[in-house]
Image (tube, rainbow, N blue to C red):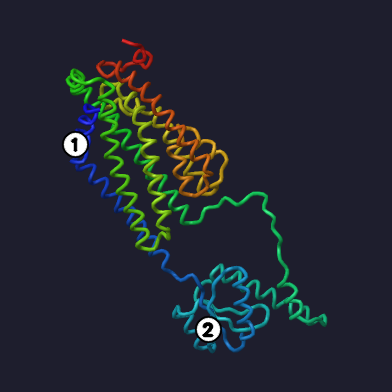
Amino acid sequence: MSVIRLIAGREIVTRLRSKVFRIATLISVVILVGIALISKVAGNGPDYQDVGVTPGAGPLAGVVTTTAESIQFNVRIHAVDEAAGRQQVRDGKLDALLTGSGAPVQVVVKSELDEGLRSVLQLVAQRATLDQQVTSLGGDPAKVAAAVGTASVAVSALEPPKKADSQQLLIGILTSVLIYMALLLNGQAVAQGVVEEKTSRVVEILLATVRPWQLMIGKVVGLGTVGLIQVAIIAASGVVAGTATGALHLHLTAAVSTIVWLVVWFLLGYTAYAFAFAAVASLVSRQEEVASAVTPVLMLLIIGYVIGISILPSNPGSGLVAMLSLIPVFAPTLMPVRLALGVVPAWQAVVSVAGMVVIIPLLLWLSARIYRNAVLRSGARVKLRDAWRVR
């Protein structure tokens, strides 16, 4: 353990001193803060429509208000005379001006009518037309309106809805992007570090005093620690910025839970993928060959990310994604997003974590064997079959 700590410490110090690491972390924080500020600015617009009502359209004021409430659309009614109302529409102080109470409903706007307000006024016009027809037939429009108003729809749900609100969706997407980038960048850093030491022959000197598996684990632990620090800084900055600007309305418990799960899945995913990256990277001797060597492992990471980001935003309760998130290969990129969306039963979270805990020791054994047999062999690319054989 002392040897592993020594190797890990060297990797941590080297990476933390790197300008690339510090710049990348700073850029990521700035991007998240920028997203929070943009969301805040974009959400500063009013969530209601100001509607002016002239004396001639006075009877419609109450109808417009009740109709808007029935479809959960916010309007503010202002009593104005027609000349002043038209000027206020022209100046942007009013979104619309009603000038008549008959059907069709007469409305004045500056350039175009808001679609939500159009829906409200369409319903108002339909009601006005209905009232006229009822009156012409000798009926009482008030009684008809009361009867229509009491009509309702009885809904019986066979399963509880699985929907995420906009806040959960935003957090889920950001979590997906962050965990994917963290695994991608830190996993490839392990692969590049292995090939760099192999190319410079440093590995031959190191393996004269330490065992191959100790060197591999030390490198994985060191770079993982740096990656964890980076993820924690970025995640905490994003939550703080989002909460401070009001872009995110998270309870403290929800915010802490999101960060904790993000860290847990980074550790599990990074450990599994880092061992795989180290093993395949030990098969080659040049930096130019790293990309082709890690492609099979990289594709598993990319597939999980693409499936999650393409399906979960529109279908958080997807059965396919739920099944894949229980498989250790895809769990690191899918389960954190599902957890952020709040659609994961407790048993699925337990099974997913347990699967990672079981697979990591197996990956360690497999990767250590390949690494040991291939890391000292320079020149042509080592075949996986040859690296697997005991030397």
Which one is in front, 267 or 52?
A: 267
| 305 sits left or right of 141 in the view | left
- Seen in the picture, residue 263 relative to 155 is either above or below; the reply is above
> Disc 1 residue type?
Thr
Q: Residue furthest front?
A: 1
**Element under disc 2:** strand
On screen, residue 55 above or below 353: below
Q: Residues within 10 Å of mark 1 (few under 14, many from 20)?
A: few
Residue 14 is labelled as 1
* 2 vs 1, front mark: 1
Give the residue furthest to the top.
Answer: 391
Within 10 Å of disc 2 (Cα), the crowding (few <14, some 14-19, many 20+) is some
Q: Quadrant of the C terminus?
A: top left
The image quarter in which residue 62 lies:
bottom right
Give coordinates of residue 319: x percent, y percent. Answer: 57, 40
Q: Position of residue 57 (x, y in %)?
A: 61, 85
Task: State the SS at label 1.
Answer: helix
Residue 144 place in picture, x, y as percent? 76, 77
Q: Which residue is mark 2?
A: 78
| 378 vs 128, nearest the viewer | 378
Q: Closer to the N terminus: mark 2 or mark 1? A: 1
Q: What residue lies at 31% left-to-right and 49% top-to-bottom?
A: 234
Q: Which mark is residue 228?
A: none
